[in-house]
Image (cartoon, helix red, strand yellow):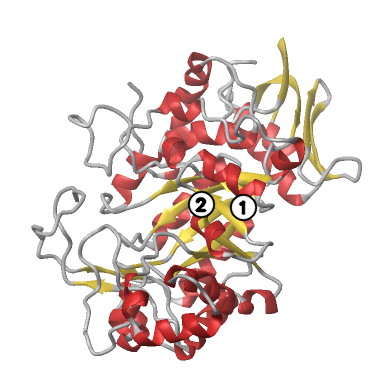
Amino acid sequence: MSDIAIVPAPRELTVHEGRWLTADPIGEAVRDVVENLGNTEYRIEVTAEGARLTAGSEDALRHAETTYAQLVEAAEPDEHGKVAVPLAHVADAPRFGWRGMMLDVARHFMPKDFVLKIIDVLALHRLNVLHFHLTDDQGWRVEIEAYPRLTEIGAWRAETMVGKMSHGQTEFEYDGTPHGGFYTKDDLREIVAYAAERGITVVPEIDLPGHMQAAITAYPELGNHPDRQLAVRQVWGISDDVLNVNDATVEFVKTVLREVLEIFPSPYIHLGGDECPSVQWAESEAAQKRQAELGLDEPGQLQGWFTAQVAEVLAEEGRRLVGWDEMVDTDCPRDAVIMAWRSAQRGEIAVKAGHETVMAPCESVYFDYYQGDPASEPLAIGGNIPLEKVYDFEPIPDGLSAEEQALIVGTQCQIWTEYMEGPEQVGYMLLPRLSAFAERAWGSPKTSYDEFLTRLRPHLTRIERIGVNYRPLD
């Protein structure tokens, strides 16, 4: 592998050392979509006669252009703008169809301009999915015209806890500062269009039936204690306040989802499904009646029923449900795509149950974890995932059959923002770990970590040009 600073590295790269094409390489390169390459494949040929980029689709041609632009940066232009580009052959295609990053804007709202910069960062790394976590207990970030209080009330919390939350903690210190914000439908359409121009799909997440305290604060009738007025949650952790299972609440969610589908053309819609306590359903007469009507053994089984009801809206529009790995335990639809987050083993369970699966294990690709000594790093939720560990990540667990491996359709890294107040903190936690993740998502040849660092150091300049912060290399 050449030490030319291409990140992620192509699957196949041959450089003819000491031989160069001197030209205006970006302007003069020939670009073609051809029929003899697969939909995700591209080729780059730099010969003495010129540069030619071919691909099996427009998306793949974008990837060719990104790689070629990085190849061109290996040399400085002369006074006429000409660059000596190494003669090279590239044959490339991604290992996975889903190469994603999740951005949580519910815990801390992120400005639209920063989201657009994140999309540029994803495109630079040939990633193709932005999973947009838009709702949670601590904030509702998407405009819904049918229910304006979701953003009038649910998008704002009075204050936020200070410091790190400990297990079982009940008393907190608060910052006394209101926090909030939301995206209008026009904002979101702009984000979707900007991403699409760069070959990136924005997959929205409306997390349900748990993680819904902000929505219940706006509309108390959605909760299991409608006579109790909640506040948008000011601490982290898991709230017991979940949606009730009444018909009116099912219709509420269906209406919300119909508006979401109008904004996001993605074939995939994420409905969360994680960390949903059933304690309130066990105490609710209405929920117990529903459980009896359905012949369910436990209150927790109401989650699967609820998800199936609201997911009918997705099926009507030809969209596919995506959910966190808890959904496997709730009798979710067979065609649901499972995002395995609790461990790689949860991914194995999902594929053995016949689900297409995106590998997103917290022990390897949760970038809200520390990336160095906690004593000298910004406050984080815990764990330790340094850059080298990300580079060593293998998305497909050992021991799966060929059929089971084929069900792993991709991989994704996560940025949860409980302890990230704004873009500077997000950039520091995301990069350059995202660069290492992109190598594994793309399927770049596994070389030494030192070789990766050799390519990464000049690559950081590209990130600087986009205007996103990153953690300096040690």
- The residue lying furthest to the top in this view is 18
- Residue beneath disc 1: 198
Q: Are marks 1 and 2 in contact (CB under 8 Å)?
A: yes
Q: Quadrant of the C terminus?
A: top left
Helix, strand or loop under label 1: loop
Q: Quadrant of the N terminus?
A: top right
| Disc 1 residue type (three-letter) | Arg
- Residue beneath disc 2: 119
Q: Position of residue 370 (x, y in %)?
A: 30, 35
In terms of depth relative to the viewer, which is nearer, 111 or 31?
Answer: 111
Q: Position of residue 103 (x, y in %)?
A: 43, 54
105 left or right, relative to 449: left
Q: Position of residue 162 (x, y in %)?
A: 13, 54
Residue at (17, 62) in percent of width and height = 160
| Disc 2 residue type (three-letter) | Ile
Q: Is residue 411 visible?
A: no
How far apart are the two marked residues, 1 and 2, measured between alpha carbons?
Answer: 8 Å
